Image: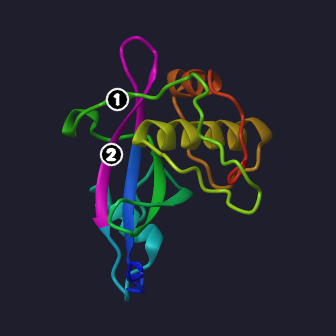
Amino acid sequence: MEAVDRTPARAALEVLLFSVDDAGRLVYRRCEGSLYADEQVDEAALAAAGLAAGHEGIWNHSTSWHRDDAGNIVLTYAVLIDPDPSAGELRVVPLENTNDRSESALSPSPTDLSVDIIARHAAEHLAFLLATGTTQLLPELPEKLLAALSCHQLRTAGEI
């Protein structure tokens, strides 16, 4: 019988910074960060994105979590608006619905998640929050960003 690894999972951060390209499509770049025991997770996400707490005009939102290939629990934050889209590779957030749902309500985590699927889920969740007015302290967002987000389905967090 194969030995089971009972090492506790570590937490890691990924931050998806959203902006709009010249074609009006929602795009993102991904940053990674660490989470330290004495650090507040929201501030750690901002630091991973190269931003400081109290930065004006930015929306920092915890959107999901997943397990990575190394067994870490990855907390995903979405940041609107990317203050420096040229700082990394930009990827278009897919609009199409991919097979990213679980097969069981008892196991809600999809088995195969790409960063594009995570970004699409984040965009759908942000679109839901904007459309339902359930956001607090939201900075004024540019019309082109609101238009790009409105192209996405509305999805609550954790929807299976």
Q: Give above or below for 8 relative to 22.
A: below
What segment is highlighted magenta in the picture?
18-33
103 vs 30, nearest the viewer:
103
Query: Considering the numbered disc 2 on the image, is that residue within a helix, a strand or a loop?
Result: strand
From the top left corner, tell me how far across and down residue 126 is, in percent.
62, 42
Contact check, label 2 and label 1, Cβ < 8 Å: yes
Q: Quadrant of residue 121?
A: top right
Please tell me how many numbered marks the rendered image carries: 2
Q: Which mark is residue 91?
A: 1
Q: Amino acid at mark 2?
A: Arg
Q: Quadrant of residue 49?
A: bottom left
- Left or right side of 63 for 87: left
Examine the rendering and report whether any part of residue 140 can be seen: no
x 30%, y 31%: residue = 90
Q: Which mark is residue 123?
A: none
Residue under numbered circle 2: 30
From the top left corner, tell me how far across and down residue 92 is, in percent.
40, 25
